[in-house]
Image (cartoon, coloured by chain):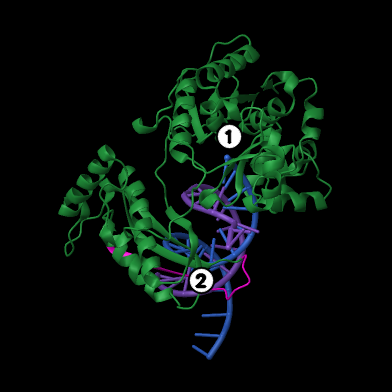
Chain colours: A green, B purple, C blue
Amino acid sequence: MSRKRYALVDCNQFYVSCERSFQPHLCGKPVGVLSNNDGCIVALSPELKALGVKRGAPAFKIKHLIDRYDVHLLSSNYALYGDMSARVMKILSDYTPELEIYSIDEAFLSLEDLQVDNWLEYGRSIRAQIQQWLGMPVSVGIGPTKTLAKVANRVAKKFAGYGGVFDITDHPRFEDILKWVEVGDIWGVGYRYAIRLNEHGIMNAWDLSRVNQKWIQQQMTIVGLRTVKELNGISCLDMELDIMPKKQIISSRSFGHPVEKLSELLEATADYCQVATLKLRNQRSLASGIMVYLTTNRFRDEPQYANYASSRLITPSAYIPDFIQAAGTLLRSIYRPGYKYKKVGVMISDIIAEKQAPLDFFEPVYIDDERKLVMDCVDRLNNIWGPGTLAYAAAGINKSWQMKRELLSPNYTSDWRQLLSVSG
DNA sequence: TCTGGGGTCCTAGGACCC
DNA sequence: TCTGGGGTCCTAGGACCC
């Protein structure tokens, strides 16, 4: 039996690196990428970190740094990041038969059945190729479990001396490394558990690896127990190779400015129904559960209101108007005039595969229905001519409520009209 | 004037049934 | 009227991830 071994490849400050890849003048400068609505900072370059800025900081609170330190802030450009991610993953897929795309900027590689003499060399060649082809810096962590590969990745990222690649397997300083990792930085241990563990004197990964298993299961459920085992080199988390269809799909966005009118909230809600059901159709699923929520801005000193309501469709569907109608009814039921709303959201749930749609004697079934033909047509046109080419009028035309993206970079790789041009 | 969005899993407890 | 065990299903809440 061959021994398990995993690599975790993680892009360094992924969103920032995507932007830098096409705007090299940003290299070496403090750069931040903002969340939707240009709200807070979700990705920072090391230079921006060095100024004391933290992930999650509201953009308006660092205004005073911008001119002084030549800080560059950018709206997030998901079309660009999604495309760059696909290119990274394509390269990685050449390095292993088993690739698990864990997030937009991270992937696990199973190394179990590979014939490789030198794992550090293997990691270095991955890193070099992605750097050369995409201008994207990555870190590679290697270990006998996914959790330890994560730890190794952290070491690779933190200590420049390792050249971005670290293998923790059978490392002579294993104990020191685990003692160096704070308990809250372990994969699977979040902010809350970190506080609780600290109260019991468990401060770092080494401490956690030594705890009593029964006790840790009581404290942190089976999930925490798995983490402890993984720190001890016992692999509990397998590769997840299938892309599982989503069990729930949420579409929500903060407004560009406060919204009071029901009519505008209805538009936004209808728009989010379009977004959510597109994802639903793309994974060939149907849904029957729908929930709508709305909320005021909790950061402002104003009357606050938040509420939600849910209902079910008679039969599972992926037809936009079915959801717009249901969502409209729900929104009206929870809407209260006189508040300044910050956000509405739509969540669809009770998702099943198209093929598993139950027969119904009394109601038409979506997949045998002209509703499916209409959706196929809408999706195809939007695929060819771009998102939003064909849309329901209920989602509004002007969309005055839409979020802000004032600092957006061009879609260099996903729109012919926005290709990077190189001139002398 | 300004503070993101989209997911998953686990467990406890209540409702309901036999 | 009220007692008991055991099972399933559903939901809400809490934790985590990026």
The residue depicted at 43 percent of the width and 56 percent of the height is A402
Residue to which mark 2 is pinned: A340
Total number of numbered discs in the rendering: 2
Does the stretch in magenta take in A311?
Answer: yes
Residue lying farthest to the front in this orientation: A424
Q: Residue at x 47, y 67 (%)?
A: A294
The quarter holding residue A165 reads: top right
Position in image of residue A108 (x %, y %): 55, 29
| Camera-side residue of A337 and A332 | A337
The reply to whether label 1 and label 2 mark residues of one chain is yes
Question: Which amino acid, by three-letter code, is at mark 1?
Answer: Val
In the rendered structure, find residue A252 and report the number of the disc placed on it: none
Q: Residue at x 30, y 47 (%)?
A: A281
Q: Is residue A214 above or below residue A186?
A: below
Q: Quadrant of residue A419?
A: top left
Decide whether residue A14 is among the magenta residues. Answer: no
Question: What residue is shown with label 1?
Answer: A16
Left or right: where A286 falls relative to A130: left
